Structures are given as C-alpha cells and as structure tokens.
Image (cartoon, rainbow, N blue to C red):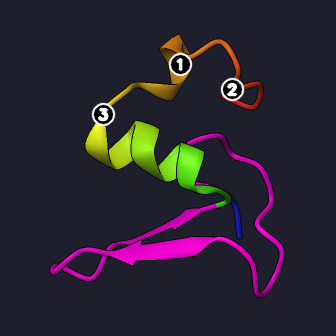
Amino acid sequence: MDCSFCGEKVPKGKGKIYIKSDGKRFPYCSSKCEKNHRKLGRNPKKVKWVKNK
C-alpha cells in the first residue's frame, strides 16, 4: 500500500488509514503526511520534501 500524500510504501501494521463516508481509502505513512493532506490541504507536487510525486 502506498501513502496517499508522499507515495512511499506503508509497511503492514504501520501508518494510518483514513476512510471517508463514501468508502474511499487514504493510507498515510506518518502523521506528517496525514496533517499536510487532510488538515492543511497541501498539494504534494508543491511540497519540497515529497520525492515520489
């Protein structure tokens, strides 16, 4: 499974999965990625520390 924000692999048993009410799944490798995507609404293409997108 890949992180929805940075694209890194999320190992089994690690990270978080956010599931919207419509059933879409958003796996995150860390709380940093989750906060940047959900709370701050940042675009991964504009964040310098994201390497995979």
Vertically, is 17 above or below 33? below
Disc 2 from disc 1: Cα separation: 7 Å
Residue that mark 3 sits on? 40
Residue that mark 2 sits on? 50
N-term mark: 3 or 2: 3
Please, what is the three-letter code of the amino acid marked with disc 3? Leu
Please, what is the three-letter code of the amino acid marked with disc 1? Lys
Q: Secondary structure at mark 3?
A: loop
The quadrant holding residue 22 is bottom left
Front disc: 2 or 1: 2
**Front residue (pair 26, 13):** 13
Q: 48 left or right of 35? A: right
* x 47%, y 52%: residue: 34
Residue that mark 1 sits on? 45
User: What span is in magenta?
Assistant: 3-28
* x 76%, y 66%: residue: 10
Do tag 3 and tag 2 residues touch (Cβ < 8 Å)?
no
Disc 3 from disc 1: Cα separation: 14 Å
